[in-house]
Amino acid sequence: MFEKALGLPLHVLVVHAVVVFVPLLVLLALAYIALPRFRARLDWAVALLAVVAPITAWVAKKSGEALEARQIERGFSGEILEKINDHASHGEMLFRVTLALGLVVLLLLVATSNHPRVPKLPGWVPVVLSIGVLGLGVAALVYVWLTGHSGSEMVWGNTYE
């Protein structure tokens, strides 16, 4: 299921969605926090990204695992397999951090919604959630970079001049 799309490895296609949606989630979530007067305009986009970004990270992880299994079947071993494992560990952390970020962002949206069904929360709750979004957002950006860099280094190495 996670091996191919349009005759290409699914992984090489879906990673581009991760590189777009995860930083966009971080950017819009931080805008939601920093610009309260625009919250009504940002809330649906932020909520959508809080769901879509972790899904793309999960699909990238699963498709990467399928690609790794295929490469092992083809006889990949040694140094290249170590690089694949390093890349996979970064991808695993990226998925986990992005999932946590999505959940905290959704909690922040609920906490700041002023919806009548949401109980009145103490003032420190949105502050703590905002700090969580900031920390997880930085971590997500770091892991997008580490994962992307290790993957592109593995593919391109020193071949591009």
Image (cartoon, rainbow, N blue to C red):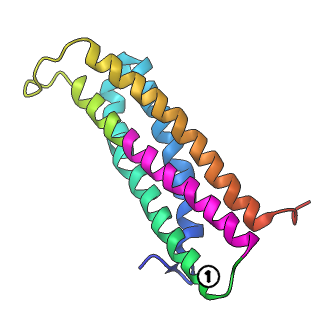
Report the residue that reaches farthest toward the bottom.
74
Give the quadrant of residue 73. bottom right
Q: Residue at x 50, y 50 (%)?
A: 93
Between 68 and 159, which is closer to the camera in this rendering?
68
Tell me where residue 129 appears, x and y as whole percent: 34, 25
Q: Which residues are magenta?
A: 78-101
Tell me where residue 65 appears, x and y as whole percent: 51, 71
Q: Amino acid at mark 1?
A: Ile
Return the residue at label 1.
Answer: 72
Q: Residue at x 56, y 84 (%)?
A: 7
Instruction: Say if the magenta span includes residue 81.
Output: yes
Give the quadrant of residue 127. top left
Helix, strand or loop at disc 1? Answer: helix
Give the quadrant of residue 44. top left
Q: Residue at x 58, y 75 (%)?
A: 68
Tell me where residue 71 appears, x and y as whole percent: 63, 81
Instruction: Say if the magenta span includes residue 85.
Output: yes
Q: Is residue 21 above or below residue 110?
A: below
Report the residue that reaches farthest toward the right.
161
Q: Is residue 14 above or below residue 10?
A: above
Position of the N terminus, as image quadrant, is: bottom left
Q: Residue at x 69, y 64 (%)?
A: 83
Looking at the image, residue 133 sits to the left or right of residue 70; the answer is left
Between 127 and 80, which is closer to the camera in this rendering?
80
Mark 1 neighbour class, 10 Å CA radius: few under 14, some 14 to 19, many 20 or more: few
Between 16 and 80, which is closer to the camera in this rendering?
80
Q: Is residue 74 above or below residue 79?
A: below
Q: Main secondary structure of the magenta part?
A: helix
Q: Is residue 137 above or below residue 61?
A: above
Tell me where residue 159 appears, x and y as whole percent: 87, 66
